[in-house]
Amino acid sequence: MAPSVLVDQNNLVAAPTKSQVSHRIAIKASHPNPSLQVTADHNLKSVEAPIYAPRAGEALVHIKATGICGSDIHFWKTGRIGSLVFEGDCIIGHEASGIVLQCGEGVDHLKPGDRVAVEPGIPCEHCFLCDDGRYNLCEDVQFAGVYPYEGTMQRYKNHPAKWLHKLPENVTFAEGALLEPLSVVMNGITSAGLSLGRGVVVCGAGPIGLIALAAARASGAHPVVVTDLEPSRLDFAKKFVPSCITYQVDRTKDAQGNAQAIRALFGSQEYVAPETVLECTGVESSVCTAAYTARRGGTVMVIGVGKAIMNNLPFMHLSLAEIDLRFINRYRDTWPPAIACLDGGILDLKMLVSHVFPLEKAQDALHLCADTSNGSIKVLIVDEEDASL
């Protein structure tokens, strides 16, 4: 696919979807509402979006920080992730925190001035999966920043108050934006069932992999090995979690060859081979390596998002070794414990923020993230304005 073209359309006004406009009352605020959209033809578009009063059950939030996720880049460059397709223009962003400006009718647990983190997925709350507490699997989830649901790369956003979580005073807005990727990792770690004193491998030293590395160590896993192709990322991982062991993936070796080298870091006997592998890349070759790395009877937890179909998984090895190959879809009931981890000092993720851009330069932030040569880890878009109604 040809690379996307950056377009400068500074004076355009967003065209909200029908669902966004219905029963909405436009209001004025102290500042305009700049936003960043991905278009259906794979462009970025800076747009002044409308500002609406919150409906019943909602809160209007001044978004103070939004992290750029790999999915934002993917939607921009390809227009889709699996069945999620950008059929029109849409404001992106879903890793966010901010300040409540106004509450709609019926909201009694929040008030203007509260600092909150945004849980971006809004489930239907009526299906059997929602009734069972597995709301992350709801087929009718409305996820911020996934067409047609507007995301958080804007100054003002309405969001159901139920899915806004208060931040303690010692948790910054930047950390609040990191709660979303932390929640992804927490769901994976909980589902994998890490054990104290048992070995773990983390495949991939990107933002999700680095959070998984820190979380696995905090969970008591030992030893913890992190793998990546790039030595600079492994150097950062060693600074971030000094006790970890790093392994640079050898491009000249196949999945079994790299797995053999990784397993050798744990010892020569099958018993001490890693019980759990947290696969955080979604790359097929890495998933295959993870399958060969886990000890017999172990678990491979795929946290990374990959291509729609993988045809080369080592099926018989997984079967004969009874490797438990698991997957997650986002998260459920993770924000309170994730906030507790940051509030209590169990995890310190501030070091992950490598670049910060003002909201008005959100396009520049996306372009920096899309260029893998610059060594960015987590890029934040922040708004330092003191916005009000």
Image: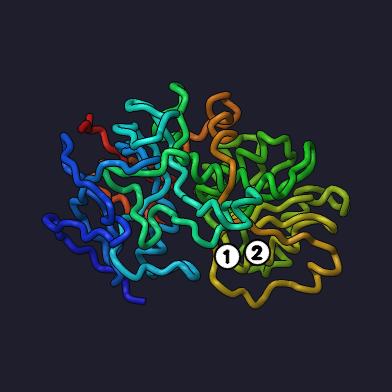
Residue furthest top as drawn: 169
Q: Where is residue 238 in the image (x, y as percent from the top left)?
A: 58, 40
Q: Do the residues labelled 2 and 1 touch (CB within 8 Å)?
A: yes
Q: What amino acid is at disc 2? A: Val
Residue 262: quadrant of the picture: bottom right
**Quarter of the image with the N terminus in it:** bottom left
Q: Does residue 248 appear anywhere in the picture?
A: no
On screen, residue 143 above or below 243: below
Q: Quadrant of residue 216?
A: top right
Q: Up-down: is 86 above or below 373?
A: below
- Residue that numbered label 1 is attached to: 283
Horizontal side of 7 relative to 177 (left or right) equals left
The secondary structure type at the circle numbered 1 is loop
The location of residue 199, given as percent across then percent down, is 76, 45
- Camera-side residue: 105 or 334? 105
The picture places residue 131, in percent across and down from the top left corner, at 62, 51
Q: Residue 268 carries which label?
A: none
In three-dimensional space, the C-alpha distance between marks 2 and 1, rounded to whole angstroms, equals: 6 Å
Q: Residue 287 carries which label?
A: 2
Check the image and report above or below for 326 versus 34. below
Quadrant where the C terminus lies? Answer: top left
Kind of residue at badge 1: Val
Residue 178 is left or right of residue 327, and the answer is left
User: At 69% across and 72% down in the image, what residue appears?
Assistant: 313
